[in-house]
Image (tube, rainbow, N blue to C red):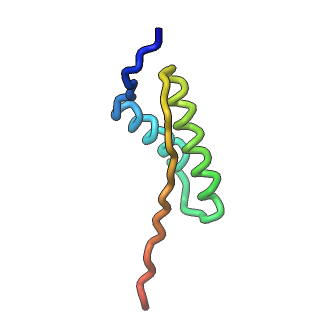
Amino acid sequence: MFSSAPVSLPRAVVQRLVVQALQVTLSDASYDAAKVAPWTNTVIDTVLKGLVALGRPFKYIGGLCQRVPRRTRQ
């Protein structure tokens, strides 16, 4: 029988997956606006594959917030 108890992933495990994906994707990269979308896709894909590899049921909601630095007046 299936249990109705919620199954959660430890925060540290998920955080490690995200940090590793960011480090591998962006380790030697210099900012390039044209590469932001591919980098984002790579990070999200890598994290989701890592979550699936854990073999535990999960639901996810993905979101991205891109911060654009404010330019100072000269």
Q: Residue at x 43, y 41 (%)?
A: 19
**Extreme residue in the bottom direction:** 74
What residue sits 50% from the left and 30% below the top? Answer: 51
Q: Name the residue at 39% across, 28% down.
A: 9
Compared with 1, 8 (above or below) is below
Give the vertical position of 7 relative to 60 (above or below).
Answer: above
Which residue is at a point 49% across and 24% down the rendered structure image?
Answer: 57
Q: Position of residue 30 (x, y in %)?
A: 54, 59
Q: Residue furthest top?
A: 1
Q: Is residue 25 above or below residue 68?
A: above
Question: Between residues 22 and 48, which one lies in front from this camera angle?
Answer: 48
* Number of marks in the rendered image: 0
Dividing the picture into quarters, in which one does residue 46 lie?
top right
- Of 67 and 73, which appears nearest the observer? 67
Q: Is residue 38 above or below residue 61?
A: below
Q: Position of residue 24 (x, y in %)?
A: 52, 41
Say which of 2 and 57 sits in front.
2
Q: Is residue 12 left or right of residue 32?
A: left
The C terminus - image quarter: bottom left
Which residue is more in the foreground, 13 or 34? Answer: 13
Residue 17: give x, y in percent of width and height: 45, 35
Q: x, y (%) of residue 73?
A: 42, 89
